[in-house]
Image: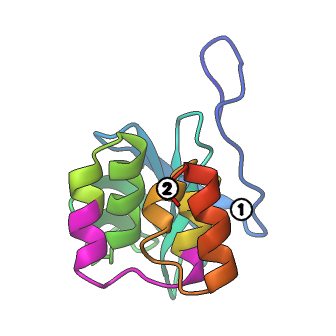
Amino acid sequence: MLTKNFELLNQQKESAKVKSGCFDENNTFIYSTSTHLKYMFASECKTTGTFKSIEHPTYVSFFMKNQVFAITRQGEVEAITVNNTDYLFKVALQKKNLMEVKDILSQGSLCGNTIVSYLKEQGHAEIALFFEQDVKARFNLAIACGNI
């Protein structure tokens, strides 16, 4: 993904060809390959992710809330419902909307080492500290964010 001056914003190596895509209101590129519906942020955080696997190629035309509107190879429009919790979490984190991040994390639908790692990568060790269980890792996070 490039700017109009050909400066690199984000890149993703795909094993399958990108079929189509569109931008949403958060300046995120929502796209399809022959096997997945994915997203890529057009920002310095260089974040990408997958919404879901798909059975047949579809051509993305519009994204709203938790639905991807796409055209099938037969020319039919279909609304594909996706779990966008991970996406909304990353958008809130990118916008530094920590109250929304807290709300999403408190719902318990995101958990595990992947989220903790992502928070650390994005420079939010203080948030990751609340979700890390390992004592050594918690100590290192506490030192990193100055919250011993």
- Residue placed under numbered mark 2 in the picture: 147
| Residue 111 place in picture, x, y as percent | 44, 83
Q: Which residue occupies the foreground of this view, 82 or 102?
A: 102
Q: Quadrant of residue 33?
A: bottom right
Q: Residue at x 69, y 79 (%)?
A: 136
Residue 17 spot, x, y in % from top left: 71, 62
Which of the pair 39/103 is nearer the observer? 103
Q: What label does residue 43 carry, if any?
A: none
Q: Residue at x 20, y 66 (%)?
A: 103
Foreground mark, 2 or 1, reads: 2
Quadrant where the image shows the N terminus:
top right
6 vs 95, nearest the viewer: 95
Percent position of residue 19, x then y: 59, 59
Could you tell me which secondary element the residue under label 1 belongs to? loop
Residue type marked 1: Lys
Question: Mark 2 belongs to which amino acid?
Answer: Asn
Estimate how packed mark 1 is, as few (under 14), some (14 to 19) or many (20 or more) residues with alpha carbons within 10 Å. few
Q: Mark 1 points at which residue?
A: 17
Callout 2: SS: loop
Q: What stretch is highlighted in magenta?
A: 102-114
Looking at the image, residue 52 lies above or below residue 23? below
Q: How far apart are marks 2 and 1 (CA)?
A: 45 Å
8, above or below 136, in the image: above
Does the magenta segment cover residue 13? Answer: no
